[in-house]
Image (cartoon, coloured by chain):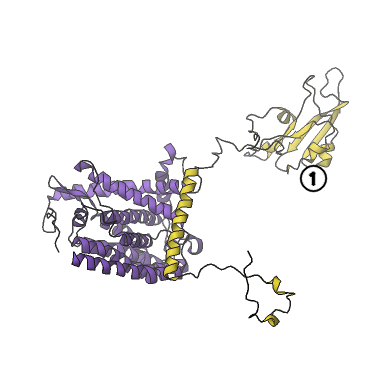
Amino acid sequence: MQAKLNTEKTDWSAFPYLESAEDVISVQRGPKPGGAGGAYRAFGETLRGLRTTFGRVLEGPVTIQYPEEKTPVYPRFRGRHKLHRFEDTGLEKCVGCSLCAAACPADCIRVVALENDPEHRVSAGERYAEVYEINLSRCIFCGYCEVACPFDAITMGHDYELSDYNRSDLIFTKEMLLAEPLDRTPLRREGE
Amino acid sequence: MSLPIPLPLAEVDYVEATWVMVVKSLIIFLGVFGIVPVLTVVERKLIGRFQNRYGPNRVGPVGLVQPLADIIKLAGKEHFRPDAAVPALYVVAPILVIFSGIVTLAILPFGNVQDGIGLYGIDVSIGVLYFFAFSSLAFYGLLLAGWSSGSKYSFLGAMRSAAQLISYEVSMGLALLGVVMMTGSLSLTHVVDGQGAIWNIVPQIIGFLIFMIAGFAETNRAPFDLPEADAELVQGFMTEYGGTKFGSYLLAEYLEMFVVSGIAVTFFLGGWMGPGPGWLDPVWMVAKTLTLVCFFIWIRATLPRLRYDQLMSLGWKVLLPLATLNILVTAVIVTVS
């Protein structure tokens, strides 16, 4: 809101940087504090404040009781990695190409590839990952591995409860990454 | 002017059997000491609700055992004293604060004389003066704590509490004086008896408001918690205290809150009066007091801490003239009628 200014009484030579009087706006100040009026206003504002805080009581708590109740995550949330199999054949999607390891900025993926035995195929491709380890204590959850993978064999899952007592326990092997997580992280519903 | 009040049995010259006095004091003491830890958890849970959260709800059913956990934690801490502290005063200060809280508890009337036993610790004929004398003693506790700790923060906190004391004690006294003039007695049971027709909060609403504001200052609670000001003074006079000594300050704070609420109920909200048979009197008294305590907590959740100069100007420029005007008007009305 622009208030009317008494432009005639103003000494404009004090403001040489102003192009015209329209550049000037007046500042709206509150009433002067103190005195009986101040005390009266303070009393009114106190009542308003009391109403505000009581409104919070009526709203009820918004706390999520964490260990029992988990925060739901968005579908594209980047949590712990998952390795995938083909649903029909049960073969691993990973062909041990190490592109994920090459893309990883934290250098936390280790892949050792081997030729597939035609009798007992492990993966659908020519080779398979004999060793596939992700050191989750180094992982920065950037998702580059997921982007780099040509076969969608590795994706970022939704699990975020990854703390452990040992650093060595945070090195996830292929079997752990292939397995379903023990408890599922809730997914955020539409509009939640 | 004299009001038609029957003299209660427990005037100063009346002596009850010693065992009655002992049992009475034990019940009041233990009862209130049972309430105080509950108050801490009630405060934390209420503050939580005022901030859209639950507050403590992990220890025991809905967090009710929380105070026990707190007490065990505090009692398990190391006893220490800063090198710069004055040993004797450093130890005496928290005792003094608790002492003043407990002693004021004695005059809170939880009911009138029933079956020859007054439902109060003692009915002194100088009730109001007694309350002021002993509640001001708590400030000596704070001052001694601040001075004897040998720490700048404690000292600043003590200075602030001294300034707060002189700004508020006067208006607080004047606020109660209106009621005293209407009743014509300083005894707390007489004051409650005088409210049979109408509670004093109606004719003395200004006195009630002034007393409550001064009560916040008296108990060092928000918005007048300048002496402890966690943000800039790191708990002020309590900075150098730990373990059970620190716990005793907390205990005293809640005890004082209970006592000041009790005094406010006695003087303005009809004390033990309420519908129902006579044995319900103490229940009414405690219920009203706890409601006021919840109001204290509500205020704490609402208002930010006043600045030092704002506190002084509120005390001297607003509360004192208002309180004086209030008793002037009351005096005129009491004399005329």
Spot occupied by residue A71 in the image (x, y as percentages of width and height): 61, 38
Q: Determine which residue is flagged by label 1.
A: A105
- Which residue sits at x=73%, y=79%? A16
- Determine whether B335 is above or below A134 in the image: below
Q: Quadrant of residue A132?
A: top right
Spot occupied by residue A114 in the image (x, y as percentages of width and height): 85, 28
Do we see residue B75 in this rendering?
yes
Camera-nearest residue between A27 and B116 = A27
Kindly identify the amino acid type of the residue bearing the numbered disc 1: Pro
Q: Quadrant of residue B238?
A: bottom left
Residue B171 located left or right of residue B115: right
Letter of the yellow chain: A
Do we see residue B60 in this rendering?
no
Letter of the purple chain: B
Q: Chain of mark 1?
A: A
Spot occupied by residue A111 in the image (x, y as percentages of width and height): 81, 34
Which quarter of the rendering shows the N terminus of chain B?
bottom left
Camera-nearest residue between B22 and A38 = A38
- Which residue sits at x=29%, y=58%? B99
- Determine whether B127 is above or below B170 in the image: above
Camera-nearest residue between B276 and B54 = B276
**Residue, far right:** A126
Camera-nearest residue between B193 and A90 = B193
- Which residue sits at x=35%, y=55%? B257
Spot occupied by residue B250 in the image (x, y as percentages of width and height): 39, 55
Residue B280 located left or right of residue B166: left
